[in-house]
Amino acid sequence: STVHAAQWHVSVANEAMAGVRGARAGGSSEAVHGALCALGELLRHRCDHLHEPQRFALMCALAREHFGARDRLVRRALVALVARLSEFDKAAFASGPISELFPFVLNVVKAHNTPEARAHAFEAAGEIALAVGARAMAPYLPELLGACADALPRKPSQKRPYLLEAVTCVGRLCLACADGELMRAPLAD
């Protein structure tokens, strides 16, 4: 039944948030990773009870708390969670949390030592752009477009591979900035 499903979602969300806080499995990186993935899936399936402003703010705050994590799986799950948060409540994300959460994704996009993580972050950046639109993305476009250009070298190498995800990101940025005005300004430099 719908009531039972809602109760189940609340229970899973509470456990996942406890896991992100480190209250499960001794706060191991594996437990935090699993909890972040669970939260991401709840957001992806648009569980109604998560639309409460306090819960949304709490999820944003929990994500922020883990930005310093060194574990690559936790960082990857955080990038995915930021994208899910932007898609879940577009207006709320664009009006506040984007300024605190998107710079994390942008830093992963610009990190040269992890091509796999960069590729994943380019995908997430494009999804975020589609979710929040041109106005919310405007402050980040110059850096993001610069990172996209950097990820598409003329002569790829082992050290600097060609990341097709950057092309996908540019395509999504174009869709998000459909009027074209915001895209022309950063490219004019």
Image (tube, grey):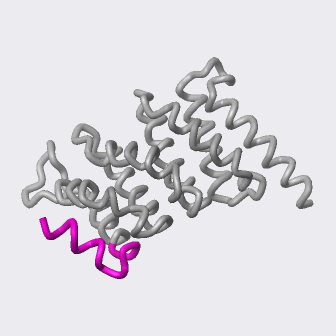
Please name the residue shown 44% across and 69% down the image: 133
Could you tell me residue 119's position as x and y percent? 33, 52
Q: Residue furthest front?
A: 95
Q: Main secondary structure of the magenta part?
A: helix
Quadrant where the image shows the N terminus = bottom right
Q: Is residue 47 rendered to the left or right of residue 82?
A: right
Please name the residue shown 17% across and 54% down the image: 150
Residue 132 in the image: above or below residue 76: below
176 drawn magenta = yes
Q: Is residue 25 rendered to the left or right of residue 76?
A: right
The residue closer to the viewer here, 4 or 158, is 4
The residue closer to the viewer here, 141 or 30, is 141
Q: Is residue 91 rendered to the left or right of residue 172?
A: right
Specify start and end residues of the magenta stretch as a single range. 174-189
Please name the residue shown 30% across and 67% down the image: 170
Quadrant where the image shows the C terminus = bottom left
Could you tell me residue 103's position as x and y percent? 37, 46
Question: In which quadrant of the rendered view does residue 20 lie?
Answer: top right
Question: In which quadrant of the rendered view does residue 141 lie?
Answer: bottom left
Q: Residue furthest bottom?
A: 179
Q: Residue furthest left?
A: 155
Could you tell me residue 101's position as x and y percent? 46, 46
